[in-house]
Amino acid sequence: MKVGVDYYPEHWDVSLWEQDARQMQEAGITIVRLAEFAWSRLEPTEGKFDFEWLDQAIALLARHEIDVVIGTPTATPPVWLTHNYPDVLPVDNKGNAVFAGVRLHRCYNSPSLRKFGERIIEQITRRYASHPAVIGWQTDNELAANDCHCTNCTRLFRGWLQRKYGSLETLNREWGTVVWSGEYSDWNQVTTPLGGSPHLNPSFLLDFRRFSSDAVAEFNRFQAALIRKGSPGKFVTHNLWGYPVTADYYDMFDSMDFASVDYYPATDLQDDSKSKMYHGALTLDLTRGVKRQNFWVMEQLSGTPGCWYPMSRTPFPGMIRAYAWQSVSRGADTIVQFRWRSARIGAEQFWHGLLDHHGQPGRRFEEFVQFSTEAGKLAPLLEGTTLKHDVAMLFSHEQLNAFQIQPQADGFDYLGNIKRLHSALLRMGVGTDVINWREDFQGYKFVIAPMLYLIDEEMAGKLKRYVENGGMLLLTTRSGVKNMNNVCLPDRLPNLLTELAGAYVDEYDPGGKDAQTLSLESGERLSCGQWCDILTPVTAETTATYSGEYFAGKAAVTRNSHGKGVVYYIGTVLDEKASQVLMRRIARDAGIDCSLELPDGVEVAIRQSDERRLIFVLNLSKEPKEVSIPIRNCVRALSGGSFSGGNVKLAPGGVEILVQVSSL
Ligand code: GAL
Ligand code: ZN
């Protein structure tokens, strides 16, 4: 467990560097990430390199026992590069070049970006390969799938399609281009989706998103290979931008040693919907799922966010520390705070760091020091621990993209609906691994496979095997709708999953924001919305029925025994309370312990090794909370007191970490 900070020495007068490094060391900082936007300082003009300032900064930090992670500077091509080699700039769907200056102004497929990117990466990696203070590398910064329509992307997209479909005839058939006379008769007619209309052929749009995702994953691989060649033996990571995103992170990280995330939880909790409150936990669980291992936070909230929008609330007292611990509780092994000093220059002057513009330590800084001191103390206990769960949730960027291309109903939101199921479990103290839907899930007791809108035989087969071997599977509405080419399947919904569900969709109603009600056999009424599948059970039993409209009395939720396992199908989108009620029931049915009842904003997460368990109890809200934790034989890691079950009182932003050693 290490604590660090993001630092931009090139933005500050050299006379401040020494003082900064000393103050960092005093604050317990042992890692600095730097240089990820400094291309114009590393290569001020074409082919003229200047590493002296970076040598000096790294040496100074090293003297204060601070290690360094260097970012490759490709997110900010310098002006000389875009000016002399305009193919670096992406082209939008109207054919206009994206102007330089904001950052991320680069096409991954640009030959000039590749050529000059390769050279700067070779230079920088060679220079620092054997530097003992340089421990690893970050590629670029927050890579995202570009929507680029330049000639290189157009040519490569065509090639991508040729490889996928083989012939134009197949492409025309698979995309259904006969509709609205969209048939191609020559490969040269195939372009990227120009014009930007959302009503272009959905198969075309999804393939273009896949191509764009593949391009960014390939760009990351290209960088990783250069770094490993130039600086062997050091780690390579990337700082992912929070969800939802178009690019497939599972592909984008196949070349990385571990995942890192930039974590900026919302600070405006006052008018916060609870779903916003629980967004952070899902983000961190998704990040842990990227490589199915612990990760880093490369940028952690330190101050008032702003610049990209009017400034939001300043983190409330306790928030910086509590959210840093939250990251650790869900698998972060290193927390790097963004950023050291708040910028006095440039576009991000009001995205605040640990220090305000005046540079004097204040409340937020002191809170961070408390966190870093505690982290230093707990580091030996955290060593070798990770999260181990019986429940998995399957996440798919492909589904996300398909739903973005064709929104299903007013308010129907793939990630938001996942968050509801995820937070319902969280509220019962049930930890969930959120993993790539294509990866192995056979070992879990309970698998939630929400909104499998695109489906193929392979996926349906894996789910079938899982259930037949005794698994508990939860399917939801909008499953089995399309094939992988974004074309509607011909049978009754949920098509390839009908046998598993033991029920079919007789009719559906995209109710959008109209609220609907459900009844359980107990008579209890619950609310739902967005979408209603009106189900006809075949082998399944009915768990809940609709209680209003023309479908009153029809099945909404079913339970089907199949092989040695069980499949639930939820044909609607449950509201928050209904999600909790039904998820508790289903999780119990799966034999999951869901005895906790956590108040709003309180989270529990458990990191463990063979020797010990660390139980994190966090109050991420601004109000004091009290929660009953029935876990015995623990030591309170922060205060040293003992704990043997009972109520834990938490101040706003309160943190309790209980340690249970197996020999106890
Ligand atoms: C991140 C980005 C940083 C900084 C920060 C605050 O998304 O990686 O460079 O811009 O946001 O806006
Ligand atoms: Zn391009």
Image: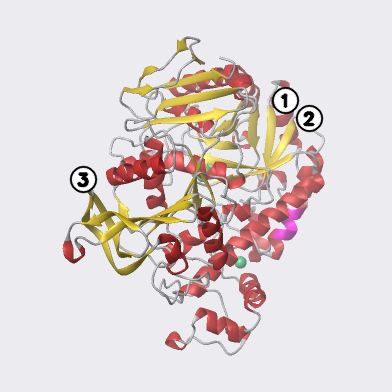
Residue 437 in the image: above or below residue 260: below
In magenta, the rendered stretch is 114-118
Look at the numbered disc 3 and say if its residue's Cβ is closer than 8 Å to ligand 1.
no
Residue placed at 63% from the left, 35% from the top?
33
Residue 559 in the image: above or below residue 613: below
Few, some or many residues within 10 Å of mark 1 (<14, 14–19, 20+):
many
Earlier sequence position, callout 1 versus callout 2: 1
* Amino acid, disc 2: Pro
- Any mark on residue 524, and which? 3
Taking depth in this image into account, of 18 and 507 the one nearest to the observer is 507
The quadrant in which residue 82 appears is bottom right
Residue picked out by circle 2: 132
Q: Residue furthest left?
A: 549
Residue 116 inside the magenta-drawn segment: yes
Residue 194 inside the magenta-drawn segment: no
Q: Position of residue 285 (x, y in %)?
A: 50, 41
Cα distance between the residues tagged 3 and 2: 64 Å
Q: In this rendering, which labeled residue sits more in front, label 3 or label 1?
A: 3
The secondary structure making up most of the magenta span is helix
Q: Is residue 241 visible?
A: yes
Quarter of the image where the N terminus is located: top right
Residue picked out by circle 1: 62
Residue 89 in the image: above or below residue 175: above
Earlier sequence position, callout 3 versus callout 1: 1
Judged left or right of residue 159, residue 244 is left
Cα distance between the residues tagged 1 and 2: 9 Å
Tell me the element at label 1: helix
